[in-house]
Amino acid sequence: MVAEALVKVPFYSGGRYLREQFPFRVFKIAIDAGFNCPNRDGSIGYGGCTYCGNASFSPNSRVPRAPIAQQIADGIRFYRERLQGEKFIVYFQAYTNTHGPLDRLRQVYDEALGYTDVVGLAVGTRPDCVPDRVLDLLARYAGRTHLWLELGLQSSHDTTLQRLNRRHTYAQFVDAVRRAQERALRVCAHVILGLPGETREMMLETADRLAQLGLDGVKLHHFYVTKGTALERLYRRSTVRVLTLREYVGLACDFLERTPTRVVVQRLTGEVAEPYVVAPHWGVTKLQVIHLIGEEFRRRDTRQGSRVKNCRLTH
Ligand code: SF4
């Protein structure tokens, strides 16, 4: 929302979406509910994705995990005091938030919804971790609250997913989206631009493929290398490179031009804690990146959706 005060954004921002949906100021509180990830605990693999450094992007996983109640209470206090927040969506962010028995899922989702001022849930997970019984459960929650299912994809190219040790395929993502849509769930896809081995054409192909799926939201960020990850070793051996700021701004515009206008752009840049970053070091804030993307759109005289191909879902 602050970003839009700086620049009238030529894309469907998360701030605009929340203002359209709610008559009060709504903020997302990211929490770590204590789940693990099947790609780390041995359920499907060990070691995780090669770029995975959850502590770098999930503030709550940097410190010993506080009880969920405390994380939510702290989040509510922060947004109330700093930004006059009125209502809140609890974002289950860290690791894989559907990786557990149904009773455990129910317990944590119910706990979050137990707060009067919590008006929604956002559940981050992997596309191979949403069996029908989990989607049925989420659909029941969607009947009583504002619910988003956030699926980590990163790329639609299986070669890239393999290189990253994601241990799922694009087909599994498409299947998860379809089954979620059959239950009328709102689905947001996470995508990383600038992944090792990906060309501009491959990234735009991901945008074109996603444009056909009828997604409700997308979260983009640039590829970055964080400390202690498998990718850090490759980066130090100079076998992978990261984007320049200028390259990322151009690619983000390219991607959004191919994204239907109905898709809410919930994130446009990564929020990495500086001590964890190996590269890139752009020296700009998140708001400055968003501002540059807005400027690039104006320079091109384009906007989100202006290059969507043959998509009946563009409106
Ligand atoms: S799916 Fe997410 S939490 Fe699991 S290893 Fe990959 S990046 Fe880490």
Image (cartoon, rainbow, N blue to C red):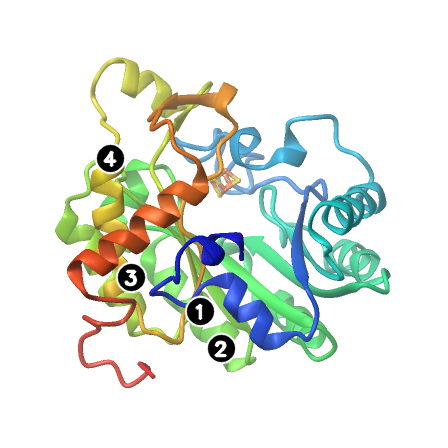
Pointer 1 with pointer 2, Cβ within 8 A: yes
Rate crowding at label 2 as few (under 14), some (14 to 19) or many (20 or more) other CA atoms within 10 Å.
some
User: What amino acid is labelled 3 in the image?
Assistant: Leu
Q: CA distance from mark 4 to mark 3?
A: 21 Å
Q: Is residue 76 left or right of residue 293?
A: right
Residue identifier under label 1:
177
Asked whether 272 or 136 is in front, the reply is 272
Pointer 2 with pointer 3, Cβ within 8 A: no
Quick check: can you spot residue 33?
A: yes
Which residue is most to the front?
6
- Residue 256's disc number: 3
Residue identifier under label 2:
181
Q: Is residue 249 left or right of residue 273?
A: left
Sequence-wise, the earlier of marks 2 and 3 is 2
User: What residue appears at the point 70 percent right and 76 percent down from the top-left corner?
Assistant: 140
Quadrant of the image occupied by residue 232: top left
Residue 72, image x, y percentages: 78, 48
User: What residue appears at the point 70 percent right and 26 percent down from the top-left corner?
Assistant: 63
Residue identifier under label 4:
196
Q: CA distance from mark 2 to mark 3?
A: 22 Å
User: What amino acid is labelled 2 in the image?
Assistant: Gln
Residue 180, image x, y percentages: 51, 73
Instruction: Determine the secondary structure under disc 2.
Output: helix
User: What amino acid is labelled 1 in the image?
Assistant: Val
Q: CA distance from mark 4 to mark 2?
A: 31 Å
Q: Quadrant of the C terminus?
A: bottom left
Up-down: is 145 above or below 296? below
Quadrant of the image occupied by residue 113: bottom right
